[in-house]
Image (cartoon, grey):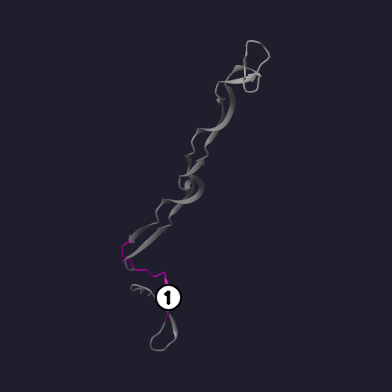
Amino acid sequence: MSEASSKVAVSEAKYRMVEKRVMVKDASFRMEGVPAVYKWEEEQVVDKLAHTIWKKGAGPIQRIDESTGEIMCLVEVPETYKTIRRKVLATPATTRRIEIPAEYKIVNVRELVEDASKAAQKFPPNTRMSRSPRRLRMHTLTGTRCIIWNTLPLPVPV
C-alpha cells in the first residue's frame, strides 16, 4: 500500500541562434563649406580721351607762332585704351549638407523558441497489500536491525 504521489517532468527552454541586423551608429549629417569661385574678366577702358594738341609743323599752311616764329599745326589725338584685368565673383561661398547613412552590423543572437515548461502526473494511492518489498528497520526497543514485511503503508521520507 502506498500514498498518492505525483511525478513532475521539467523541460528546459529551447533556443536557436539567429543573425540580426543591429544599428551601430545613427544616421547623421555634416555641413561642409564650399568656397567661393572667382573668375578673371578683362575690360577695355579709356585711358585718355580724344583731344587736340599743337605740334611743330613743316608746311606753309600751318600757323606760325608769333612769339617764337615756329610753324605749329593743330593735331587731333585719338582716345587711348588700356586693358584692366580684375577678379570677379562667379559663385558665392556656400555650405552643403552631406548625409551620413546609419551603420549596421550583423550579430548572432540567441532567440527563445520554446519556453521552459513543467508537466505534473498524479498517481492515485495504492491500496494493494504487498509482501515482496522488505525494509531493514531498527527495532525501537532493542536497537538491533530486523526485517519487517511491509504490510502497512510505507512512510514517506522527509
Q: Which residue appears at 38% of the width and 88% of the height? A: 141
Q: Residue 21: x, y in percent?
A: 48, 45
**Magenta highlight: main SS:** loop
Q: Nearer the viewer, residue 1 or 7?
A: 7
Q: Residue 12: x, y in percent?
A: 43, 57
Q: Residue 59: x, y in percent?
A: 67, 11
Q: Nearer the viewer, residue 4 or 80?
A: 80
Q: Which residue appears at 41% of the width and 89% of the height? A: 142
Q: Is residue 127 magenta?
A: yes
Image quadrant occupied by the N terminus: bottom left
Q: Residue 67: x, y in percent?
A: 62, 23
Asked which quadrant contains residue 123, the reply is bottom left
Q: Which residue appears at 50% of the width and 42% of the height? A: 32
Q: Is residue 29 magenta?
A: no
Q: Nearer the viewer, residue 158 or 3?
A: 158
Compared to 23, does 85 lie above or below?
Answer: above
Taking 7 as reference, is 110 left or right? right
According to the image, label 1 marks what residue?
135
Image quadrant occupied by the C terminus: bottom left
The magenta region covers: 123-137
Asked which quadrant contains residue 135, the reply is bottom left
